[in-house]
Amino acid sequence: MAEGDLGRVYRDGEILVRQGDAGDCMYVIQEGQAEIFVERDGKEVLLRTAGAGEVIGEMALFERVVRSASVRAKGEMRALTVDKRNFLKRINEDPSLAFRLVKLMSAKIREMSEEVARYRAGEENHQFGE
């Protein structure tokens, strides 16, 4: 990863976000990958792996709630941190940025809805011995 590039370099396994912490920024993955996981009953459950160009933690810009998942670098990665003030400034300069973020969030909601539907279908099949 080149020196002088924007963003911060995270080492393999380094935590960007911890589940339960207050959130005040989002991250744009510039290079590498990040694992998004939750802790349930003392065990880690991997939700997905995010890669270059993806935005993570964007809910923190809109809601004042704790982080719903943890994020850690998978290998070396570079991510740009964007806080609410800078985000609003950028939207003022380029309103299409807001539309792109809403589109991204819509796609994530659709993906999660499909995952829930698959999970529920699997539970029903399991209950009926299929």
Image (cartoon, rainbow, N blue to C red):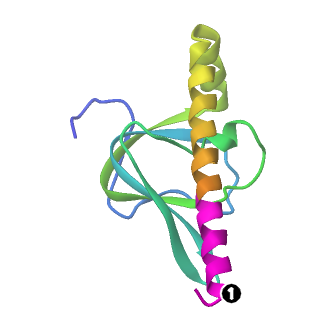
The x and y percentages for residue 10 are 36, 51
Numbered disc 1: secondary structure: helix
**Quarter residue 116 falls in:** bottom right
- In the picture, the quarter occupied by the C terminus is bottom right
Q: Is residue 18 visible?
A: no
Q: Main secondary structure of the magenta part?
A: helix
On screen, 71 above or below 101?
A: below
- In the picture, the quarter occupied by the N terminus is top left
Asked if residue 35 is among those painted magenta in the image, a careful observer would answer no
- The residue at 59%/9% (across/down) is 93
- The residue at 53%/76% (across/down) is 44
Asked if residue 124 is among those painted magenta in the image, a careful observer would answer yes
The x and y percentages for residue 50 are 43, 50
Q: Is residue 4 left or right of residue 45?
A: left
Towards the viewer: 128 or 17: 128
Q: Amino acid at mark 1?
A: Gln
**What stretch of residues is rendered in magenta?**
115-130
Q: Is residue 128 visible?
A: yes
The x and y percentages for residue 101 are 59, 29
- The residue at 66%/21% (across/down) is 88
User: Counting other residues with Cα less than 10 Å from the Cα at mark 1, is it few (<14), some (14-19), or many (20 or more)?
Assistant: few
Q: Is residue 106 left or right of residue 13?
A: right
On screen, 66 above or below 30?
A: below
**Quarter residue 67 falls in:** bottom right
Q: Residue beneath label 1, please?
A: 127
